[in-house]
Image: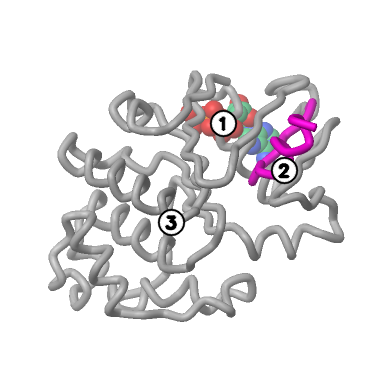
Amino acid sequence: MLPTLFYLDAMVNIENISISFGNLTLFRELDLQVCCGESVCICGGSGSGKTSLLKAILGFVPLSEGTIKVDGTVLTPKTVDHIRKKIAWVPQELALPSEWVSEMVRMPFELKANREAGFSKERLMEYFISLGLEAELYDKRVNEVSGGQRQRIMLAVTALLDKPLLIVDEPTSALDPESCLRVINFFKSLCSKGMTILSVSHDKQFASGCDKVFTL
Ligand SMILES: Nc1ncnc2c1ncn2[C@@H]1O[C@H](COP(=O)(O)OP(=O)(O)OP(=O)(O)O)[C@@H](O)[C@H]1O
Protein backbone atom coordinates (compact mmCIF):
# COMPACT_ATOMS: atom_id res chain seq x y z
CA MET A 1 0.00 0.00 0.00
CA LEU A 2 2.77 2.49 0.80
CA PRO A 3 3.95 3.08 -2.78
CA THR A 4 0.35 3.83 -3.84
CA LEU A 5 -0.03 6.43 -1.10
CA PHE A 6 3.29 7.98 -2.09
CA TYR A 7 2.25 8.36 -5.72
CA LEU A 8 -1.12 9.84 -4.72
CA ASP A 9 0.79 12.58 -2.89
CA ALA A 10 3.19 13.32 -5.75
CA MET A 11 2.57 16.64 -7.52
CA VAL A 12 5.15 15.73 -10.17
CA ASN A 13 5.99 12.11 -10.94
CA ILE A 14 8.67 11.58 -13.57
CA GLU A 15 9.32 7.97 -14.55
CA ASN A 16 12.11 6.68 -16.73
CA ILE A 17 12.27 9.71 -19.06
CA SER A 18 14.88 10.44 -21.70
CA ILE A 19 15.27 13.67 -23.66
CA SER A 20 17.21 14.06 -26.91
CA PHE A 21 17.55 16.75 -29.54
CA GLY A 22 18.56 14.91 -32.72
CA ASN A 23 21.86 13.14 -31.95
CA LEU A 24 22.30 14.98 -28.63
CA THR A 25 20.97 12.96 -25.68
CA LEU A 26 20.64 15.16 -22.59
CA PHE A 27 19.82 12.35 -20.16
CA ARG A 28 18.32 8.84 -20.09
CA GLU A 29 15.96 6.95 -17.77
CA LEU A 30 15.53 9.75 -15.26
CA ASP A 31 13.17 9.34 -12.29
CA LEU A 32 12.07 12.20 -10.04
CA GLN A 33 9.17 12.63 -7.64
CA VAL A 34 8.16 15.96 -6.16
CA CYS A 35 5.63 15.65 -3.34
CA CYS A 36 2.84 18.14 -2.67
CA GLY A 37 4.02 21.07 -0.54
CA GLU A 38 7.69 20.34 -1.22
CA SER A 39 10.37 22.62 -2.67
CA VAL A 40 12.84 20.78 -4.90
CA CYS A 41 15.86 22.38 -6.58
CA ILE A 42 17.45 20.83 -9.68
CA CYS A 43 21.19 21.48 -9.94
CA GLY A 44 23.73 20.36 -12.51
CA GLY A 45 26.32 21.58 -14.96
CA SER A 46 25.61 24.03 -17.75
CA GLY A 47 23.97 22.20 -20.65
CA SER A 48 23.02 19.14 -18.57
CA GLY A 49 19.37 19.63 -19.51
CA LYS A 50 17.87 21.36 -16.44
CA THR A 51 15.79 23.87 -18.39
CA SER A 52 14.78 21.20 -20.91
CA LEU A 53 13.48 19.07 -18.03
CA LEU A 54 11.33 21.97 -16.76
CA LYS A 55 10.07 22.59 -20.30
CA ALA A 56 9.25 18.87 -20.70
CA ILE A 57 6.98 19.07 -17.61
CA LEU A 58 5.19 21.98 -19.29
CA GLY A 59 4.86 19.95 -22.50
CA PHE A 60 7.15 22.23 -24.54
CA VAL A 61 9.90 19.60 -25.02
CA PRO A 62 9.01 16.06 -26.19
CA LEU A 63 10.20 12.92 -24.38
CA SER A 64 11.97 10.14 -26.27
CA GLU A 65 10.76 7.72 -23.60
CA GLY A 66 9.07 7.61 -20.20
CA THR A 67 6.11 9.39 -18.64
CA ILE A 68 5.44 12.57 -16.71
CA LYS A 69 2.44 12.92 -14.41
CA VAL A 70 1.37 16.21 -12.90
CA ASP A 71 -1.11 16.03 -10.03
CA GLY A 72 -2.03 12.49 -11.10
CA THR A 73 -2.61 13.30 -14.81
CA VAL A 74 -0.30 11.76 -17.43
CA LEU A 75 1.08 14.43 -19.76
CA THR A 76 -0.14 13.82 -23.34
CA PRO A 77 -1.12 16.15 -26.21
CA LYS A 78 -4.72 15.82 -24.97
CA THR A 79 -3.96 16.69 -21.31
CA VAL A 80 -1.30 19.36 -21.83
CA ASP A 81 -3.72 22.33 -21.58
CA HIS A 82 -5.27 20.91 -18.41
CA ILE A 83 -1.78 20.42 -16.91
CA ARG A 84 -0.57 23.92 -17.86
CA LYS A 85 -3.54 25.39 -15.98
CA LYS A 86 -2.07 23.91 -12.79
CA ILE A 87 1.37 25.44 -13.31
CA ALA A 88 2.79 28.93 -12.82
CA TRP A 89 5.98 29.15 -14.86
CA VAL A 90 8.79 31.69 -14.46
CA PRO A 91 11.35 31.30 -17.28
CA GLN A 92 14.98 32.37 -16.95
CA GLU A 93 14.70 35.27 -19.39
CA LEU A 94 11.59 37.31 -18.85
CA ALA A 95 10.77 39.75 -21.60
CA LEU A 96 7.22 40.93 -21.02
CA PRO A 97 6.48 43.70 -23.52
CA SER A 98 5.16 46.36 -21.11
CA GLU A 99 6.20 49.93 -20.50
CA TRP A 100 4.92 50.10 -16.91
CA VAL A 101 5.34 47.68 -13.98
CA SER A 102 1.59 48.07 -13.27
CA GLU A 103 0.88 46.67 -16.78
CA MET A 104 3.56 43.97 -16.62
CA VAL A 105 2.17 42.45 -13.41
CA ARG A 106 -1.28 42.07 -15.00
CA MET A 107 -0.12 40.43 -18.23
CA PRO A 108 0.06 36.81 -16.95
CA PHE A 109 -3.59 37.10 -15.87
CA GLU A 110 -4.62 37.66 -19.51
CA LEU A 111 -3.30 34.27 -20.67
CA LYS A 112 -5.84 31.53 -21.42
CA ALA A 113 -4.30 29.18 -18.82
CA ASN A 114 -4.63 31.82 -16.06
CA ARG A 115 -8.13 33.21 -16.67
CA GLU A 116 -9.47 31.68 -13.45
CA ALA A 117 -6.96 33.58 -11.29
CA GLY A 118 -7.93 37.04 -10.04
CA PHE A 119 -5.46 39.92 -9.88
CA SER A 120 -5.28 41.60 -6.45
CA LYS A 121 -3.06 44.65 -5.97
CA GLU A 122 -3.46 44.31 -2.18
CA ARG A 123 -2.08 40.75 -2.13
CA LEU A 124 0.63 41.68 -4.61
CA MET A 125 1.77 44.44 -2.22
CA GLU A 126 1.94 41.90 0.64
CA TYR A 127 4.20 39.73 -1.52
CA PHE A 128 6.28 42.82 -2.42
CA ILE A 129 6.93 43.39 1.31
CA SER A 130 7.89 39.71 1.86
CA LEU A 131 10.36 39.94 -1.03
CA GLY A 132 11.87 43.26 0.11
CA LEU A 133 10.37 45.31 -2.75
CA GLU A 134 9.23 48.91 -2.19
CA ALA A 135 5.57 49.60 -3.03
CA GLU A 136 6.66 52.57 -5.23
CA LEU A 137 8.10 50.13 -7.77
CA TYR A 138 4.53 49.36 -8.84
CA ASP A 139 4.18 52.83 -10.45
CA LYS A 140 7.57 52.84 -12.19
CA ARG A 141 8.50 52.20 -15.79
CA VAL A 142 9.85 48.66 -16.39
CA ASN A 143 13.17 50.11 -17.60
CA GLU A 144 13.53 51.97 -14.27
CA VAL A 145 13.67 48.77 -12.17
CA SER A 146 16.76 46.60 -11.77
CA GLY A 147 17.10 43.00 -13.00
CA GLY A 148 16.93 41.71 -9.41
CA GLN A 149 13.83 43.80 -8.67
CA ARG A 150 12.14 42.58 -11.86
CA GLN A 151 12.98 38.99 -10.95
CA ARG A 152 11.34 39.36 -7.52
CA ILE A 153 8.34 41.27 -8.97
CA MET A 154 7.68 38.33 -11.30
CA LEU A 155 7.98 35.84 -8.41
CA ALA A 156 5.36 37.87 -6.52
CA VAL A 157 3.07 37.88 -9.58
CA THR A 158 3.53 34.18 -10.13
CA ALA A 159 2.61 33.40 -6.52
CA LEU A 160 -0.52 35.52 -7.02
CA LEU A 161 -1.65 33.14 -9.77
CA ASP A 162 -2.44 30.64 -6.96
CA LYS A 163 -1.44 27.54 -8.93
CA PRO A 164 -0.64 24.29 -7.12
CA LEU A 165 2.73 24.00 -8.89
CA LEU A 166 5.31 26.75 -9.37
CA ILE A 167 8.13 26.02 -11.84
CA VAL A 168 10.98 28.53 -11.73
CA ASP A 169 14.21 28.73 -13.72
CA GLU A 170 17.07 30.44 -11.82
CA PRO A 171 14.94 32.52 -9.41
CA THR A 172 17.93 34.16 -7.68
CA SER A 173 20.43 34.63 -10.54
CA ALA A 174 20.34 38.45 -10.20
CA LEU A 175 20.07 38.62 -6.40
CA ASP A 176 22.42 39.40 -3.51
CA PRO A 177 22.52 36.99 -0.49
CA GLU A 178 20.00 39.06 1.53
CA SER A 179 17.44 39.07 -1.31
CA CYS A 180 18.13 35.38 -1.95
CA LEU A 181 17.23 34.67 1.69
CA ARG A 182 13.96 36.56 1.22
CA VAL A 183 13.14 34.36 -1.79
CA ILE A 184 13.98 31.21 0.24
CA ASN A 185 11.63 32.33 3.03
CA PHE A 186 8.96 33.40 0.53
CA PHE A 187 9.03 29.95 -1.08
CA LYS A 188 8.87 28.30 2.37
CA SER A 189 5.73 30.27 3.19
CA LEU A 190 4.13 29.28 -0.17
CA CYS A 191 4.96 25.60 0.48
CA SER A 192 3.47 25.82 3.98
CA LYS A 193 0.21 26.88 2.27
CA GLY A 194 0.33 23.75 0.07
CA MET A 195 2.08 25.01 -3.06
CA THR A 196 4.75 22.78 -4.64
CA ILE A 197 7.86 24.43 -6.08
CA LEU A 198 10.28 22.96 -8.60
CA SER A 199 13.22 25.16 -9.47
CA VAL A 200 16.50 25.09 -11.34
CA SER A 201 19.43 26.93 -9.79
CA HIS A 202 23.20 27.25 -9.78
CA ASP A 203 22.98 29.23 -6.53
CA LYS A 204 24.22 27.13 -3.58
CA GLN A 205 22.60 29.44 -1.01
CA PHE A 206 19.21 29.10 -2.71
CA ALA A 207 19.57 25.31 -3.15
CA SER A 208 20.40 24.86 0.55
CA GLY A 209 17.10 26.57 1.44
CA CYS A 210 15.02 24.01 -0.52
CA ASP A 211 13.65 20.76 0.95
CA LYS A 212 15.55 18.61 -1.55
CA VAL A 213 18.27 19.01 -4.16
CA PHE A 214 18.29 16.81 -7.25
CA THR A 215 21.50 16.77 -9.28
CA LEU A 216 21.14 16.15 -13.00
N1 LIG B 1 15.07 23.21 -28.71
C1 LIG B 1 16.32 22.73 -28.74
N2 LIG B 1 16.81 22.18 -29.87
C2 LIG B 1 18.07 21.68 -29.89
N3 LIG B 1 18.92 21.69 -28.84
C3 LIG B 1 18.48 22.24 -27.69
C4 LIG B 1 17.16 22.79 -27.58
N4 LIG B 1 17.00 23.24 -26.32
C5 LIG B 1 18.15 23.01 -25.67
N5 LIG B 1 19.04 22.41 -26.49
C6 LIG B 1 20.40 21.97 -26.13
O1 LIG B 1 20.26 21.05 -25.05
C7 LIG B 1 21.33 21.23 -24.11
C8 LIG B 1 20.76 21.44 -22.73
O2 LIG B 1 20.10 22.72 -22.68
P1 LIG B 1 19.37 23.22 -21.35
O3 LIG B 1 19.00 24.65 -21.57
O4 LIG B 1 18.29 22.28 -20.99
O5 LIG B 1 20.56 23.07 -20.29
P2 LIG B 1 20.72 23.67 -18.82
O6 LIG B 1 21.22 22.56 -17.96
O7 LIG B 1 19.47 24.35 -18.38
O8 LIG B 1 21.87 24.73 -19.07
P3 LIG B 1 22.25 26.13 -18.31
O9 LIG B 1 22.61 25.76 -16.90
O10 LIG B 1 23.43 26.62 -19.09
O11 LIG B 1 21.06 27.05 -18.41
C9 LIG B 1 22.17 22.39 -24.63
O12 LIG B 1 23.29 21.84 -25.30
C10 LIG B 1 21.25 23.11 -25.60
O13 LIG B 1 21.98 23.71 -26.63
Mark 2 or mark 3, which is nearer to you?
3
Q: Which residue is mark 1?
A: 50
Label 1 near label 3: C-beta < 8 Å? no
Whichever of callouts 1 and 2 sits on the residue coming sooner in the sequence is 1
Q: Which mark is residue 112?
A: none
- Is the residue marked 1 within 8 Å of ligand 1, measured from its CB? yes
| Element on which disc 1 rests | helix
Label 2 near label 1: C-beta < 8 Å? no
Q: Nearer the viewer, residue 8 or 51?
A: 8
Whichever of callouts 2 and 3 sits on the residue coming sooner in the sequence is 2
Q: Position of residue 188 (x, y in %)?
A: 35, 45
Dot 2 surroundings within 10 Å: few (below 14), some, or many (20 or more)? Answer: some
C-alpha gap between disc 2 and disc 3: 30 Å
Q: Which residue is mark 2?
A: 61
| Element on which disc 2 rests | loop
Viewport quadrant of the C terminus: top right
Tell me if residue 154 comes above or below residue 68 in the rendering. Answer: below
Dot 1 surroundings within 10 Å: few (below 14), some, or many (20 or more)? Answer: many
Q: Which mark is residue 193?
A: 3
Q: Residue at x 43, y 32 (%)?
A: 211
The amino acid type of the residue labelled 2 equals Val
Tell me if residue 45 comes above or below residue 88 in the rendering. Answer: above
In magenta stretch: residue 208: no
- Is the residue marked 3 within 8 Å of ligand 1, measured from its CB? no
Colouring method of the image: one colour
Q: Is residue 24 left or right of residue 35?
A: right
The residues colored magenta run: 1-16
Q: Residue at x 81, y 37 (%)?
A: 67
Tell me if residue 164 comes above or below residue 169 in the rendering. Answer: below
In magenta stretch: residue 5: yes
The amino acid type of the residue labelled 3 equals Lys
Whichever of callouts 3 and 1 sits on the residue coming sooner in the sequence is 1
